[in-house]
Image: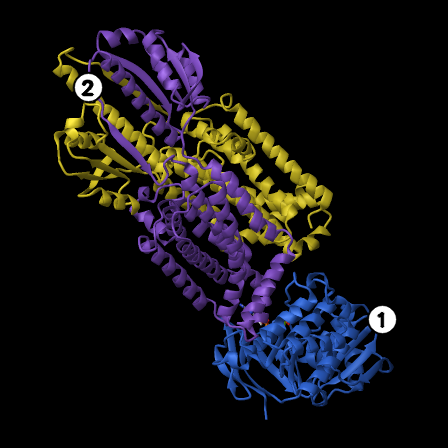
Amino acid sequence: MIRRILPFIKKEFTEILRDRLSITSLLLLPSILLFLYGYAISLDIKEIKISICDKERSEFSREFTDGLISSGYFRITARRESPNEIESDLRTSKSQVGIIFYPSVYKNFLRNNEPSVQILVDGSNAQSSQYTLNYLVGAIERFTQNAIKKELIRINTIQTPTEPLLTERILFNPLLKSPLYLIPGLIAFVIMITGAISTTISIVKEKENRTFEQVILCPVSPFTLIIGKIIPYFVISLVSSAIMILLSILFFDLPTKGSLLFLSYAVIIFLLCASGFGMLISTISSSQQVAFTIAAFSTLLPTIILSGFVFPINNMPEIIQLITYIVPAKYFIAILRGILLKGSSLSELYPETLSLTIFAVLIVSASIIRIKKKGII
Amino acid sequence: MEIISVKSLTKRFGNFTAVDNISFGLKPLTINGFLGPNGAGKTTTIKMICGLLRPDEGSIFIENIDVIENPEKAREKMGYMSQNFSLYPDLTARENILFFADLYKIKKSERDNRYAELTDELNLHEYQNTLTSDLPLGIRQRVALASAVIHHPVLLFLDEPTSGVDPISRMKFFDFIRKYINSHKATAIVSTHFLTEAAHCNEIFLFNRGKIILSGQPAEIIQNFRYNIFETKTSLLTGEIKNILNNSEGIIEFYIFGKRVRIITEEDIDIQQISVRTGIDISNISVVAPSFEDVFISLTND
Amino acid sequence: MWVIISFIKKELRQIKRDKRILPILVVAPVLQLLVLGYAATFDIKNIEFAVCDFDMSNSSRELIDNFTSSSYFILKYQTHSTTEIDTLLSSGRIKSALIIPKNFEKQLYTDRNTKVLFLTDGTEGTMANVSLMYARTILSRFINRYNTGQMYRVPAIRYELRIWYNPDLKSSNFMVPAIFALLLSIVAMLIPSMALVKEKETGTIEQLYVTPIKPYQIIFGKMSAFMLISIIDVVIVTTIAVLWFNVPLRGSLFDLVAAILLFLISTLGIATFFSTVTNTQQQAMMSVMFLFFLPSMLLSGFIFPVENIPLLVRWISYILPLTYFIDILRNLFLKGSTISELWIQYSMLSLIGIAIFIFSLLKFRKNID
Ligand SMILES: Nc1ncnc2c1ncn2[C@@H]1O[C@H](COP(=O)(O)OP(=O)(O)OP(=O)(O)O)[C@@H](O)[C@H]1O
Ligand SMILES: [Mg+2]
């Protein structure tokens, strides 16, 4: 068996290495991308821009805006004369929040009158609006707290009002650095692409060029043939994942508390899932174009959206949550985050590890069965 | 008078010269055969004349159109069949042929007439609606030919149109070309590895290492062949014969097929001398007329 | 013109011949939008949460109630062991935890200084950030309520909070247009990139070169076929976005169509470009994938805000058509922005489209050496 596969692997490697463009994109680009994206992308929210319309400039309005600004999340970018201008600021995204103080607001304060501060929030960016709203509510709450404190002191009921003391501790990624929680997702994404897409294309290419017909006459089973085709891509993807993980440890200070053995196991199993998936696609595609189309649709967006990479899975509707069970990247990302950021051990991650392993076994055997039954051509 | 005239044409790939300063002219209403071993530069020359490759040096004129400067102008007149019968594998024979007709803006009624005519002449009826990827090579060749002539070009460039095709189909192929040339006042360039096909050509161009080493009418070429050809039957082992012949003077070339040996010698060597030099019994040697193969091999083998 | 039409006809015929590709190109985007439109949600609710209450007083129970009744946190475990909290967090069974020390209530009444510990898992940054804000707000409210309990008059800011354009902060309103844009770039950039190269691989391109067809006609014919498929997708997907996901379409249909066409021109231009500079389908696909598609997914503002990208890398965002297209779509759908308000985006989109097309036309000359 091994002796029969060897020539194929050799031939495949020779071909890949000869095609400069492919080998660079497979080996080098993932690392470059990881590096780039590790620095570039983040989900942090920058300062939220506020437009203010405040004609009266009362003590209250000053305290209120000072309160907002002192929270550190807001910046006043425009002072406007009329509410209409505020509206146009929001429309053209010059600011995300508009605050309008109506006249004689101070008099109304502390009385149960009509609201006289109007806060407008641009909700169109559902992502940042979430934060904006939370920060706003938090800031207002704190402002109220101060107001109450003053009032309590004024009416002299007590000397020192109660202060809340919330001790917060963020575990595993204390500074909430984006790269740390995004990098496992990026690695999964890149492995899925190099593993699944290049495997499937390389198989279907031979189908299309009819070079398979030639090789099929050799005394090897179609299965051997496919394995021979997959191993080089497997090895290349493995090397490129190793480089990626190494790079992220070196440049992004990933803690890497977990076991290296467990990490390698997870990467290999996930790669198996990816290659198996690639194989399966190639058995049902007649041309590179079809294979690529299927592969692109089934891996690109799902790996980003359904894997927990950015969108927490337990916030999705239940049906969609069920669908995520068949996205192997979901398990892989959970495992990777566990190992790299938390130093979790196999015993803590066994459900994910088990699922990923089962998935790999299932998908690889499905494609083997299909090849055995239908041949590869 | 000349429909195509080529002057000092040169093409280099890197530091390798694929076509090396060749010049020739083609007369109208002729079939011109490009012969030569693999890599001799036939395809490269044809591609340059079609405007598919830009030459490094030299000029190409078709009638009085400068092909290098205005490749578009000559396009309507050209029909090209590439070395590997390039067709759309996922289209049927019919769709392939009609597609090319449409690219030449042939009116529908006219197009359909021509299509019917071609399918008749090339016997394509039963294959019309088969995907070309599923057709046998010989049929694919005819589909490619039909696609190349549907717009009635007066210049046909056929790059190894007969490779991989059986002898009868090859004969029919040349019959078709000859008829086409006569009825459309056309001129053809055909590259081939089959030396027997030289007989179908009006003019032969023998390529070797990027140069034309010999050209002329086939009969003329054989007439001008300066060497003598002998044939002998022998029961000796190949190695022994080789040993003998390699050590005999005046022998330019020899080749062995089966028990027969063909020997090409200098002009001044006759049958007796051969017998003496090689020690083969004179009754076992016969003088034969040179064939095209002999010319080809004596010139290109080194 | 006639030549182009027959070329397009041939293209469509080839696409139709492969029984799989057309259904995939039409059905896949629809299915994906339906699933991903729901999945891509920024709402953070039901954060799995554990409590370790060492005080067991009324006040501590009240505080816990404030947490659990908020719909932000969902109580999974109650325990008295901090080590258990540790393992729960590190195994990912819970995302955050609240630890209330002994004497919480006593301190509240006497020292006036209350201490509680809130732990959150930083591996999912967004979740961590949001849960922290929730916790702070809940605690602030709790204390305010406690303090105001001792007052006659309760000062409170009366403010009116209005959320414009997307009052329920539905993530789908924000994400569906973006997913739509991304799906369109698969259909109109990734897949067409292989189309022209395919002719090179089969050798038919030479056959085309010797016919009078002009290079721009070949490109135009190739790309029109994909344009057609893309337009079918656009119609279906927009319908789903508007009717199924109820994304409000506040802008004008004309502006929308203009943006889509400009976007398609630029994506098809990119596809053409890579098709002309590569020799095999595999190369074409890999180049577009790594050089354009992945950057588009990550740097266009699809998920990760463009403002957060460091300026040096942001230049990449600025040359990606998707950056402008997503921006236009979101503003056009939700805010009803017009071309004149978004003229920068529109002109950048046109500029990229025209530039890349001219570039590939120049590259794609009739001589193939
Ligand atoms: N694009 C190219 N780049 C580099 N070398 C080339 C290229 N095209 C052709 N050649 C080389 O030029 C030489 C001439 O090739 P050409 O195809 O013209 O030969 P030919 O006479 O048609 O041979 P055959 O009978 O095998 O078709 C060959 O050695 C070939 O390797
Ligand atoms: Mg040739």
Q: Is residue B60 visible?
A: yes
Q: Nearer the viewer, residue A292 or A215?
A: A292
* Label 2 – label 1 distance at C-alpha: 122 Å
Percent x, y of residue A283: 65, 46
Q: Nearer the viewer, residue C24 or C309?
A: C24
Quadrant of the rendered structure where residue B82 is? bottom right
Chain given the colour yellow: A
Q: Nearer the viewer, residue C126 or C142?
A: C142
Dot 2 crowding, Cα within 10 Å, few <14, some 14–19, many 20+:
many
Q: Which mark is residue A148?
A: 2
Across the whole image, how many numbered discs are drawn on residues? 2
Q: Which mark is residue B235?
A: 1
Which color scheme does this rendered protein use?
by chain
Judged from the image, the secondary structure of the residue bearing numbered disc 2 is helix
Rendered colour, chain C: purple
Q: Chain of mark 1?
A: B
Quadrant of the rendered structure where residue C356 is? bottom left
